[in-house]
Structures are given as structure tokens and as C-alpha cells.
Image (spheres, rainbow, N blue to C red):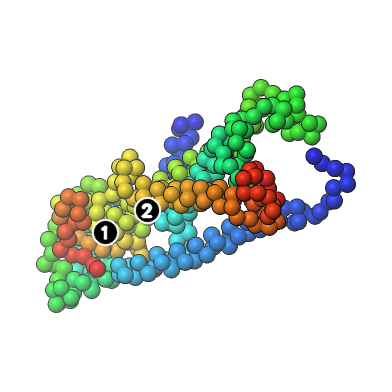
Amino acid sequence: MSSVDEPTYGFLRNNALSLAFGGLFLATLAGQAVSGTAQFNDQQVANGLEPIGLAGYVTSSSFMVDVMENWQSEYLQFFLYIFATVWLVQKGSSESKEPGQEGTETDREQVVGRHANADSPTWARTGGWRTTLFSRSLGLLMGGLFLLTWAASAVTGWVAFNGEQLGQRQDPVGFAGYLTEADFWNRSFQNWQSEMLAVGSMAIFAVYLRQRGSPESKPVGVAHADTGQTG
Amino acid sequence: MRGAAALLAGAAVALLTGCAGAAEDDVRAVTTAFEDPAGDPADRCAMLAPATRAALESDESAPCADAIDQLPLDGGEVTAVEVWGGDAQVRIGDDVVFLTETGAGWKVTAAACEPRGEAPYDCELEGP
């Protein structure tokens, strides 16, 4: 609900969370590029080969597969969490709805169709396929990004794997062959397991622990059994 | 749509493998010259990666130009070229040759190689 008395802030303050994490993302990606180049070159020297420069490393399949394998697991995590929290609850968790509210809820509760407000997004008001699609757009985008980045992880992983095979005087494999290689599945599972652990532990820790002022937590004084409150 | 996806995937692989077409020509040319038994030994030695050359001279206790003629490098027709990033493999005659990309072009890292199934090739000439 917007109010005419709502104070207005500048662009930076209104977007501080997105901008801060966007900046942290770029800084940490640069850190990965620099440390990855050093690690790659340690291996090159150990194998009696020439070191490569930063530009050579960031355009290599070795760097790209390391980036893509992490991105795909993050998008898988959000995709699964967004859809799972529609149907599964955790009593007492700020990450969950109240038990009994499982499912996609009514149009009135979701403020769509004829229950939409004047300032509701257009596609929430129009009904039909547009509202159906918009109602699932966040999860679908995460799912789509997961599939894209997982496919990119497979292609870049294949190229990197074949480079390593040749470096070890072994034959390269075809793309279908790579999809059955332990390298591909180990890269996928080692990232997936950490995402599932992070999500599962956040859901249950948020029942008993608080972070004062964070919307990821319940207000400090709210009971452990109280579900779905944020503060 | 599927054609576009295939085109994109192909472009991605070409980019990642370093524009394979030009690299394949270079790799093929280096391998053919290196394997030519009639080639100048000094020129053939210059086509070796430094660590591979050092390993050959150490193993044979002789300068590369003298040792290289003792290796079973018979040349022949190139039947397959694989380039993946900065690594390459060429099948030439009965031999399999491995190369790496350096600032001075493609250099041979291993040659006179016999397959051993899933295990790495057994190469008479190879670096560390």
C-alpha cells in the first residue's frame, strides 16, 4: 500500500541492496579471475608449459566453466526455493508461509484479476495467459536461467575437459560422451549440494535465531512458533 | 529456433577453442614439418616445446639435433586434427603427436605415441 506521506529517497538509497551486491559481484568475479590466472599458471609451469595472461585466462574454457558451474547452481537454488515454498512450509520460519496456506492461494489473496488494485502491474489485472504467466514469472526466469547456465556449464566444461585430456596425452571426447563423464556430474553435484544445504539450514535457523532489523529474520521478540513474519 | 541454438552453440565452441579453423591449419603445418624425416634436425628441434626438448636431451645424453633422428618419426598423411583451447592432437601416418600453443606458435609436447586404451598415450618423446 503506497501512501502520499511516504518519504522519497534518491536513486542510490532506493537501490542500495541491488547496487551493493552488483558491485560485490564484479569485485569478487575480478578476484576469481586474478586468483584463477595464478592457479592456472602454477599448473602450466609445473607441466613445463608457458604461463598465460589475464586476458587469455578470462576467455579460456577453464575460467568460464568455473563461473558457469557456480551460476547454474545459484539459479537452481532460487528456482527450487521459489517453487518449493509455494507448496511446502516450515512452521516458525520467516522463510515460510503459515501451515495451511500451502498452494497458489486465491485471486483475492494474490490481488490479481478483478481483485487487482489500480497500481497493480498490468499483466496482474488483464487475466488470461498474461496473468498466468506473470504469476509465475519469477520462478520461470530462475528456471530458465538455470537451464541456460547449466547448458553453458556443459559446453565450457566439455571444452576445458578436452584441453585437459590432450594435456595429459589422452583422447578428447564428444559432447554426448562428456555428459556421461564424472567431471560433468561432479561439477554439478558439488555445487548443488551446497545450495541445498544453505537453503535448508536458512529455513530452519530462521525459526530459532534472529537478526535484528533484517527482513530475512523475524522480529527479535516474536515467538519461535510464529511463522511467516519478517522484521 | 533449433538451428539458431545450434549456431549459437557452435559459435560458443569456436570461440572457446580459439577459432579452431586457423589453429588447425597451423597445427597441421607444424606437425607435418616436424615429422618430415628429411627435415633439417635443427628446424625440427625448434618445433619442440622447451621442456620436451630438455627431456629428450637429458634422456639421450645428446644434443637434440643428434637425438631427434633416432626417434621413430616417419611422417605420412594427416588423418585427424583436434584443437581444444591451447592444446592439440594430430594423427599423422602411424603416429599421434601432441602440441601446445606458445607465444612463438604451436610446439610439439609429445610424439611417437602409442595408445593404451583409457590410459594416457605411451610416448617415446615427451616432456614432464
What is the C-alpha distance between the residues marked 1 and 2?
Answer: 12 Å
> Mark 1 highlights which residue?
A168
SS assignment at label 1: loop
The disc label shown at residue A160, or none: 2
- Horizontally, residue A172 falls left or right of residue A193, namely left
Instruction: Say few, some or many: other residues with alpha carbon within 10 Å of mark 1 (under 14 / 14 to 19 / 20 or more).
Output: some
Of residues B51 and A146, the one nearer the viewer is A146
Is residue A63 shown above or below A76? Answer: below
Residue A69 appears in the figure: no
What x and y, as percent, mark residue A153?
43, 47
Q: Secondary structure at mark 2?
A: helix
Figure check: B53 above or below A190:
below
Give the image location of residue A22, x and y in percent.
Answer: 63, 55
Q: Earlier in the sequence, mark 1 or mark 2?
A: 2
Residue at the (13%, 64%) spot, across then down: B71
- The residue sitting at 68% across, 55% down in the picture is A220
Q: Quadrant of residue B100?
A: bottom left
Residue displayed at 34% across by 50% down: A183
| Figure quadrant of the C terminus of chain B | bottom left
- Residue A58 lies, in percent from the top left, at 48, 59
The three-letter code of the residue at mark 1 reads Gln
Mark 2: amino acid: Ala
Residue A200 shows in the view:
yes
In the shown orientation, is residue A118 left or right of residue A207?
A: right
Q: Residue furthest right?
A: A5
